Amino acid sequence: MNVIVIMLDSLRPDHLGFYGNPWIRTPNLDKFARESTVFERAYAEGMPTLPVRTALFTGKYTLMWRGWQHLEPEDVTLAETLRTRGYTTALITDTAPMYWPRMAYERGFEYVRFIRGQLTDIYVVDPVKVDLSEWSEKNYLTEKDKEDFVQYLKNRSWWRDEEDHFVAQVMEAGVKWLREMKEKGKADRLFLWLDSFDPHEPWDPPERYYKLYEVKGYKGLPIINPSIYGERGGFVENFTLDEIRHIRAQYAGEVTLVDRWVGWFLEEVEGLGLLEDTLIVILSDHGEPLGEHGIIRKVRPWPYEELSRIVLAVRHPRGIGGGRRVRALVQTPDILPTIFDFLGISEGPISSRSELEVYPELQGASLRPLIEGNAEKVRDYAVAGHYGRSWSIRNEDYSFYLWSLKRAPYTFGYGIIEEQEREKPELYRIDRDYVPPPPEGWKEGDQPEREDLAEEERDLASELELALRRELMSLEAR
């Protein structure tokens, strides 16, 4: 059986039709979900981008051991393991942090395609005229921030059509590789990790996608990359309500753009005759704050619901679990064991490197019993946070948060966020039925966790704090 994993960075479940959003336009992902097992309570654990991928590639938790960093030499990855089992492996991505020097996330992949130009990637170095008067100054609030924004605009200066956008480039490169494999007679035992940075900011979808959600009263210039730097960056009080609504509309347009191209990719996979023998996993690494809890973007290491909850849908080629909705708590380290389970790999990962002929213990749990309807849960809690900065735990109804009391720099290189602003533990009842309103109607306070109950429900807060500490200690003991 082939395996394709489609990673969509910063995609919030509550901005997808199949997770209950009635106004977003995501027909292709909705169709995929109808044929898949959808996990309604899936969570990242260590965040953001790179720690999540470490957990996905190794089947291990990162929250207590490492933050934003490269893979370690002793890490044995999903791609390495499948390659030793005779799989042809490929990584195609525009996720810039993955191809920064010496990060090693390409380990184990025979074919690697890094699509350049995202974020601050110094890709286009030729002189390109950039007219900043076309953009709101809230895209950049410091000189370094302005340099980065200009670099991104230079990187996209050659775009002419929708096909030039990053998500389109990623999906087209994925189809090209699959087509080449089929032409070479290698259309089985394929493993493709397709990693799209969209809908991560900058949120600059083609105009027609933004128009689907635009805020009619907004008269300002486009804000596609709201700055999180300087004294004013990232906080809702530094934006007008119409600006926040405009930003949310840009994000929604980007989500619909992503849906369009993921749908195109899946149609091409079907056209190549691969759909009938390919396990497909679609997920996101985390969500994105869009005004909730007073912040926009990941300006603070606050693992609230809008950031920690992820998209996860698994489609089995034989229809196993198709149409099933799972409310059990699941986490990113569970993806690797699930793939192994469906492929019949029972003895654990093994490296092809002779000096590392080891079978490291996995910390994630296979989700196959949930997909097949043979289990109700694989864990009692889900943990999430940022290494050395924040920790949280969730059950079916509540979320509890602990914060680092020491100085905890987060957004590096800009001389800000010198210390943690959250000090007291927080407890929330999670509104599991929450769906954000359309951008035009959003207002501050619209979020799935509204009232801090830590003082009111002290016994419950203490119970969840004890459970959190036990969960983290149990991980350290493995």
Image (cartoon, rainbow, N blue to C red):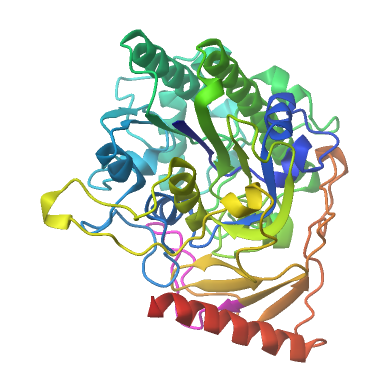
Q: Residue at x 33, y 24 (%)?
A: 124
Residue 14 appears in view? yes
- Residue 247 placement (x, y as % from top left): 69, 40
Residue 130 appears in view? no
Locate residue 456: give its quadrant. Answer: bottom right
In the rendered image, residue 304 lying in the magenta stretch gets the answer no
In the visual, does 466 lie left or right of 112?
Answer: right
In the visual, does 169 lie left or right of 107?
Answer: right
Q: Residue furthest left?
A: 355
Q: Is residue 344 above or below residue 51?
A: above
- Residue 364 placement (x, y as % from top left): 48, 61
Q: Is residue 18 above or below residue 133?
A: below
What range is drawn magenta here?
Answer: 402-418
How many circles with numbers are drawn on the protein? 0
Q: Is residue 146 above or below residue 39?
A: above
In the visual, does 124 lie left or right of 162?
Answer: left
